[in-house]
Image (cartoon, rainbow, N blue to C red):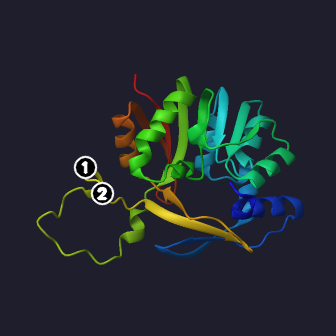
Amino acid sequence: MNRKKDPMGRAIAEYYKTRKAGKLRVFSPMFDEDEIPVETLFRSFEDMPGIERKALDMARGKVLDVGAGSGCHSLVLQQWGLDVTAIDISPLSVETMRQRGLKNVLEQDFFTLEGRFDTILMLMNGIGIVGTLERMPEFFHQLDKVLSPGGQLLCDSSDISYVFEDEEPEEEDETSGMDETFDGSEDTYYYGELSFRMRYKDTIGDPFPWIYIDADTLRRKAEENGYQVEVVAEGEHYDYLARITRKK
């Protein structure tokens, strides 16, 4: 990633140095402007949501933390004595994690990663990096390469269908009632597929696809690719923690 187009990394780096940060702004064509409070990216274990604490408690063996950001999850695991590697595509985030004392940090895209891990963490909707349902087979193919035999992927996400509950229903036609998510057509629409762009001060990132995936859809896509999903915890905002393992 180009440092000049790394708004989250810049926000993380500035907050670490000064304990102050401006607005990390998030834009999407589908929603009003939002903001990520930068200080929450530096939270302690005690300040993490229950779903994240549960995931860290379940981590074992050699751990990979995908999209690690400021490294808050990896730092906890390192303090607990686990062998953890943190990866992120943000160069400024990677620099900050090293400055915070993380031993194993890589500026790395998950989809080109090599190595084997017993636990893979994708927290804070980290599985969103897959971007679209269409890319799910590619994601599971990469998981085949990096997940050790008997290993586990722990990820959280949300079912955001509630966002659209107040919208006016479309006029019914002879295809109404069909499950559009899985009708097999190339132009299938899934409501969890979004596009975002971030800005921090005068640093503007490129647009990127992001997916929020409900548990049933994740379960179906996993089974299509030789994996199984167990929902191990549910949050208060339509969110959940899933444990993904290879089918036996």
Q: Are marks 1 and 2 in contact (CB under 8 Å)?
A: yes
Please identify the residue farthest to the left as the structure is shown.
Answer: 174
Residue nearest the observer in this picture, 127 or 146? 146
Q: Residue at x 53, y 48 (%)?
A: 127
Q: Is residue 61 above or below residue 91?
A: above
Q: Residue furthest right?
A: 18
Element type where label 2 sits in the image: loop
Q: Where the N terminus falls, by quadrant?
A: bottom right
Residue 200: x %, y % from top left: 72, 70
* Tag 1 secondary structure: loop
67 on left or right of 238: right
| Residue underneath mark 1 | 184
Q: Position of residue 158 (x, y in %)?
A: 47, 56
Q: Quadrant of residue 86?
A: top right
Specify the amino acid type for callout 1: Gly
Q: Is residue 147 left or right of residue 223?
A: right
Q: Which mark is residue 188?
A: 2
Residue drawn at (77%, 42%) of the image: 75
Q: Looking at numbered disc 2 in the image, what kind of residue is underneath it?
A: Thr
Q: How many marks?
A: 2
Question: Is 121 on the left or on the right of 43, as rendered?
Answer: left
Q: Residues within 10 Å of mark 2 (few under 14, many from 20)?
A: some
Q: x and y percent of residue 202 in the render? A: 74, 74
Instruction: Tell me which residue sits at (50%, 64%) in the image.
Output: 195
Q: Horizontally, is 229 left or right of 114 in the view?
A: left
Image point 44% across, 37% down: which residue? Answer: 230
Q: Position of residue 217 (x, y in %)?
A: 36, 48
Q: What is the quadrant of the C terminus in the image?
A: top left
